[in-house]
Image (cartoon, rainbow, N blue to C red):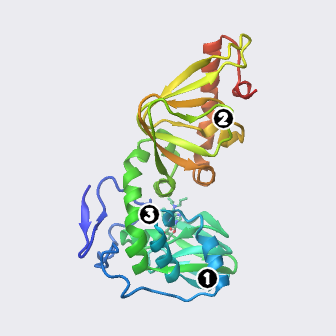
């Protein structure tokens, strides 16, 4: 990967693996800033503090709770960031961000609705709505590019704004590292081709790598489900206990083997049912794990493909047991 070096600190990835959002304009790239990117500089000197009442602080804590790019901050970094944020009331109809502008702030939604528009073939198209939650405006600050979208309040809103310098000093490096770490891996997974590159970046923000030892049970048939897994390294066996076929031997039967790039754990989340099978690490395994909330928010466009795959599971069951079986039979 090539890097744009930034005086005084780290570097900004811009190489062939970086897939910017569809309407990113490289030609209009703003000059690379000399702002520091890490806490190495004595940031206490220019620490930004916007005093808040207890009520505001509480509201801010709730608003940032699910903001993925804040999750990798440690306690001290988090305090710096929250101190620097300030409340901004926005009337209905106001453009909070305009496509093509330079980036000044990152925003977290406290309340209200905003629409996000991008330009496709010269036409503005609404791509999503922020409905009393979410955050936007990170791209221009992270990659020193013009704003990639226009964001308009469709009703009166309250936002929390974070200035560019604090964002870059505290949030940039951890977010960038994580997006870079997962980028190539996620781009190569067929299931995720349904997502826009921007959506894959959000997915990277939400993933947590978890290690399992050979022989360890990662998920157990019959258990309640709260996570989705993509294998980064190693292989896993999918096994079911035969309590359901006409012979019901109660023995564990191997259904299939999964390797890097393959996923599991989706069925119970989609159908809100207990785990239909166990998954056991055959070697030492690393998985990128997504919690149920992020799965529902970020993988919506892929659910149909996962559902289509159920018929493959059922054909495999029928082949193994010699009788027509459905996934529901496994949960009896
Ligand atoms: P920004 O600093 O460029 C506009 O300012 C913000 O809109 C941007 O950061 C994101 O936080 C947010 N593509 C680009 N930016 C988006 C998109 C988006 N959605 C939200 N923003 N999409 C890709 C469309 C091809 C929509 C994906 C669902």
Whether residue 102 is visible to the viewer of this picture, yes or no, is no
Residue drawn at the location 65% of the way across and 16% of the way down: 318
Q: Where is residue 272 drawn, in percent x and y?
A: 71, 42
2 vs 1, front mark: 2
Circle 3 Cα neighbour tier, 10 Å, few/some/many (<14 / 14–19 / ≥20): some
The picture quadrant where one finds residue 284 is top left
Circle 2 Cα neighbour tier, 10 Å, few/some/many (<14 / 14–19 / ≥20): many
CA–CA distance between discs 1 and 3?
22 Å
Q: Where is residue 289 drawn, in percent x and y?
A: 52, 46
The picture quadrant where one finds residue 252 is top right
Whether residue 6 is visible to the viewer of this picture, yes or no, is yes
Q: Where is residue 226 drawn, in percent x and y?
A: 63, 46
Mark number, residue 275: 2
Q: Is mark 2 within 8 Å of ligand 1?
A: no
In the displayed structure, 227 sits above or below 132; it is above
Q: Where is residue 294 drawn, in percent x and y?
A: 59, 54
Quadrant holding the N terminus: bottom left
Dot 2 or dot 1: first in sequence order is 1
Q: Residue beneath label 1, please?
A: 94
CA–CA distance between discs 2 and 3?
40 Å
Judged from the image, the secondary structure of the residue bearing numbered disc 3 is loop
Judged from the image, the secondary structure of the residue bearing numbered disc 1 is loop
In the displayed structure, 20 sits above or below 39; it is above
In the displayed structure, 196 sits above or below 56; it is above
Residue drawn at the location 48% of the way across and 35% of the way down: 262
Locate residue 10 relative to residue 77 in the image: left or right: left
Q: Residue beneath label 3, please?
A: 23
Quadrant holding the C terminus: top right
Locate residue 6 relative to residue 220 in the image: left or right: left
Q: Is mark 3 within 8 Å of ligand 1?
A: yes
């Amino acid at each position: 990967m090539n890097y744009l070096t930034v005086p005084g600190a780290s570097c900004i990835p811009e190489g062939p693996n970086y897939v910017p959002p569809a309407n990113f304009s490289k030609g209009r790239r703003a000059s690379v800033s000399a702002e520091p990117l890490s806490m190495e500089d004595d940031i206490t000197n220019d620490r930004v503090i916007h005093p808040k009442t207890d009520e505001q602080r509480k509201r801010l804590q709730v608003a940032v709770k699910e903001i993925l790019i804040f999750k990798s901050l440690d306690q001290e970094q988090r305090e710096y960031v929250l101190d620097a944020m300030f409340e901004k009331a926005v009337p209905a109809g106001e453009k909070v961000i305009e496509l093509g502008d330079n980036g000044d702030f990152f925003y977290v939604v406290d309340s209200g609705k905003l629409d996000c528009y991008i330009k496709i073939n010269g036409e503005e198209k609404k791509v999503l709505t922020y409905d009393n939650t979410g955050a936007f405006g990170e791209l221009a600050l992270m990659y020193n590019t013009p704003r990639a979208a226009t964001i308009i309040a469709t009703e009166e809103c309250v936002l929390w704004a974070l200035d560019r310098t604090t964002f870059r000093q505290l949030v940039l490096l951890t977010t960038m590292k994580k997006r870079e770490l997962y980028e190539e891996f996620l781009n190569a997974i067929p299931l995720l081709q349904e997502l826009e590159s921007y959506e894959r970046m959000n997915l990277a923000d939400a993933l947590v790598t978890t290690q399992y030892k050979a022989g360890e049970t990662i998920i157990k048939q019959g258990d309640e489900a709260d996570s989705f897994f993509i294998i980064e390294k190693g292989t896993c066996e999918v096994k079911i206990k035969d309590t359901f076929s006409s012979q019901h031997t109660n023995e564990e039967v191997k259904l299939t083997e999964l390797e890097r790039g393959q996923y599991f754990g989706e069925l119970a989340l989609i159908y809100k049912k207990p785990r239909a099978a166990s998954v056991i690490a055959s070697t030492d395994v690393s998985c990128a794990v997504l919690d149920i909330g992020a799965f529902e928010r970020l993988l919506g466009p892929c659910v149909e493909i996962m559902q289509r795959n159920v018929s493959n599971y059922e054909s495999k069951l029928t082949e193994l047991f010699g009788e027509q079986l459905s996934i529901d039979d496994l949960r009896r």
